[in-house]
Image (cartoon, rainbow, N blue to C red):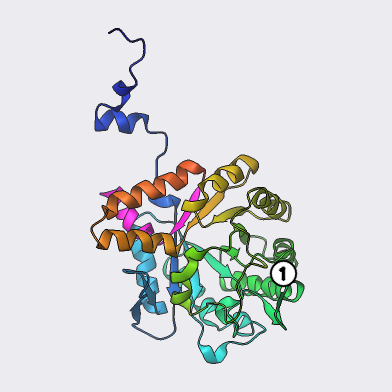
Amino acid sequence: MHLIRRNRILRQSPAIRAMVAETIIKPSDFIAPLFITEGSGIKEEISSMQGYFRMSIDLTVVEVKELWSLGIKSVLLFIKCKDELKDNKGTEALNPDGLMQRSIKAIKNACPDMVVMTDVALDPFSTYGHDGIVEGNEIVNDPTVEVLALMSVSHAEAGADIVAPSDMMDGRIIAIREALEVNNLTRTGIMAYSAKYASCFYGPFRDALDSAPGFGDKKTYQMDYANRREAIKETLMDVEEGADIVMVKPAMAYLDIIREVKNSVEVPVSAYHVSGEYAMIKAAAKMGWLDENKAVMESLTSIKRAGADLIATYYAKHAAKLING
């Protein structure tokens, strides 16, 4: 048997496979989500996210320093608002001394070079658990956008490098961009959750922040998972309105969308490896059904291979340690 081409030649040793690997994943590709709660010395494991924690600001700062030492360059902040501070207007979200604002300042003081991204949405602050202001049974768009723009300004003034609106309200990117410009906050970027689907894979996240919707669901503003063209339309509009980075969320069940978006835009593309995707790997590994380390690296590599330049993942620290050896 005489073959002109033997493809297995480039697979025959670890060194050769590494030499010709098409997709290389590194710690700086990761965005580490962090859940922050009030208090001091607090580290609470999230029941549906084994090995992941809500932490008070002091312990969050320690975590950020470790993430930086591992080569992770960005964190995405989420805060757990006290129930007594929640309302239907996002009042606490605009508090200059609120938990988010204090967290931003503490992290930037402790680790100035860490890129601090902040969640911009009303669900953690809402008595209804929705991403916007509720009137009757409707989540109203335009009044919500006004608050989101003010919220973004507040985060930027506290020192956030990038604000990340995750709400999926119409027109919020241009409103945020204009608000930042008017307030001379011209160095603050916007990472738009451009193609955020109404997904069942967010369940553990809502446990982490006690932010499940109090009525109905989020299908009137988050996208229908059956749709592909809509994701491209939403993303292109966000780029036109001033988004610096666009995001697809979730990631693993939407690899086709990540690739479509990557092929359609000239800005960095991020993808969110969400809480349910994290929890599934954890659960299967706990049962002995798969090798957790191998599953993590294969999953994250597939997301980057699909076209993601950045990956928000609860496995950021774990994966960075694996990569660093």
The stretch drawn in magenta includes residue 317 = yes
Q: Position of residue 266 (x, y in %)?
A: 63, 43
Give the residue displayed 55% in from the left and 47% down from the top. Answer: 258
Relative to residue 191, is residue 290 drawn left or right? left
Relative to residue 251, is residue 62 drawn left or right? left
Q: Is residue 109 visible?
A: no
Give the residue displayed 52% in from the left and 43% down from the top. Answer: 307
- Disc 1: which residue: 183
Looking at this view, name the residue that lies furthest to the bottom: 84
Magenta-drawn segment: 309-325
Quadrant placement of the N terminus: top left
Work out whether 139 lies above or below 19. below
* Image quadrant where residue 44 sits: bottom left
Q: Position of residue 54 (x, y in %)?
A: 39, 76
Q: Is residue 41 visible?
A: yes
Give the residue displayed 44% in from the left and 81% down from the top. Answer: 37
Relative to residue 261, is residue 50 drawn left or right? left
Q: Nearer the viewer, residue 275 or 315?
A: 275
* Image quadrant where residue 213 sits: bottom right
